[in-house]
């Protein structure tokens, strides 16, 4: 087979067959038929080599399923568990703030003076108790007091009338911002606040973090095994 120069090959790559034949004749002195045959042989041989290379690549490439049912379910599990984790991360943050401020909490008596509420467009009315501890006016909110969400003011008033006294732990240096309807600067009295908050954190890990980690690991393992072809049909 006649050797083709780079200049001729370049013309062929540009899909200029006639120019390639003309250039080959100029370089070699071939007649038209010889140059035409040489160019066609070159194209045929190179096309066959390219096809063989592509066919070999197809054979050696793992045939992966882009989105199997298992991957879809696991992916959805990762997404939903992450959303749940994110929404409830405020619980973890609240407990961390309390644990870092343990030394500032002192036992006191919260005297109820009135009701206070926040009108949340999504969750409805969220009631809290307004009052004072040792002369400091503040608000107490804790779901364990009563289900004070979406209920009438009269029901809350009957359970906690003005003048009611509640044992609490009070730390004036902690933020008075509510964390998921829970006050942090004033907390219902517990003899072991540290253990109570650690228990909350453990519960958060079980309910929020563990599902996300589990789904993520399952998806990672499945994808890893799928790349090795173990789950292919």
Image (spheres, grey):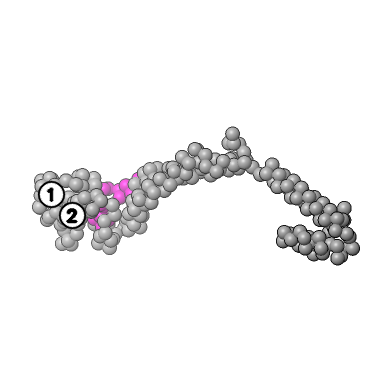
Tell me which segment is drawn in magenta.
181-199
Left or right, residue 75 beside residue 9: left
* Residue 24 place in picture, x, y as percent: 84, 62
Residue 117, image quadrant: bottom left
**Label 2 secondary element:** strand
- Identify the mark nearer the N-term, 2 or 1: 2
Where 35 sits versus 79, above or below? below
Left or right, residue 178 beside residue 6: left
Is residue 205 among what the camera can see?
no
Q: Residue at x 87, y 53 (%)?
A: 1
Q: Residue at x 59, y 34 (%)?
A: 233
Q: Residue at x 69, y 42 (%)?
A: 59
Residue furthest right as drawn: 29
Residue 86: in magenta span? no
Residue in front for this viewpoint, 199 or 231:
231
Residue furthest front as drawn: 32
Q: Which residue is mark 1?
A: 153
Left or right, residue 117 beside residue 59: left
Q: Residue at x 47, y 44 (%)?
A: 75
Q: Residues within 10 Å of mark 1 (few under 14, many from 20)?
A: some
Where 161 sits versus 26, above or below? above
Q: Which residue is mark 2?
A: 117
Callout 2 touching callout 1 (CB < 8 Å): yes
**Disc on res. 5:** none
> What is the C-alpha distance between the residues marked 2 and 1?
9 Å
* Residue 154 place in picture, x, y as percent: 10, 47
Q: Residues within 10 Å of mark 2 (few under 14, many from 20)?
A: some
Is residue 121 among what the camera can see?
yes
Residue in front for this viewpoint, 89 or 144:
89
Q: How many marks?
A: 2
Residue in front for this viewpoint, 71 or 159:
71
Residue furthest top as drawn: 233
């Amino acid at each position: 087979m006649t050797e083709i120069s780079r200049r001729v090959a370049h013309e062929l790559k540009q899909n200029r067959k006639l120019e390639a034949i003309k250039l080959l004749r100029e370089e070699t002195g071939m007649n038209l038929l010889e140059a035409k045959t040489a160019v066609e042989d070159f194209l045929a041989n190179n096309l066959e080599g390219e096809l063989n290379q592509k066919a070999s690549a197809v054979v050696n490439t793992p045939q992966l399923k882009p989105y199997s049912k298992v991957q879809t379910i696991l992916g959805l599990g990762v997404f939903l568990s992450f959303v749940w984790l994110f929404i409830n991360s405020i619980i973890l943050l609240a407990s961390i703030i309390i644990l870092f401020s343990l030394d500032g909490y002192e036992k006191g008596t919260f005297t109820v003076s009135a009701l206070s509420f926040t009108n949340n467009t999504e969750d409805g009315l969220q009631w809290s108790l307004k009052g004072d501890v040792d002369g400091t006016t503040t608000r107490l909110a804790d779901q364990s007091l009563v289900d004070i969400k979406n209920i009438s003011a009269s029901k809350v008033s009957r359970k906690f009338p003005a003048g009611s006294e509640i044992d609490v732990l009070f730390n004036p240096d902690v933020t008075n911002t509510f964390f998921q309807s829970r006050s942090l600067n004033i907390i219902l009295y517990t003899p072991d606040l540290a253990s109570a908050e650690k228990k909350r954190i453990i519960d958060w890990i079980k309910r929020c973090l563990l599902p996300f980690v589990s789904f993520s690991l399952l998806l990672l393992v499945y994808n890893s095994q799928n790349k090795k072809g173990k789950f292919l049909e």
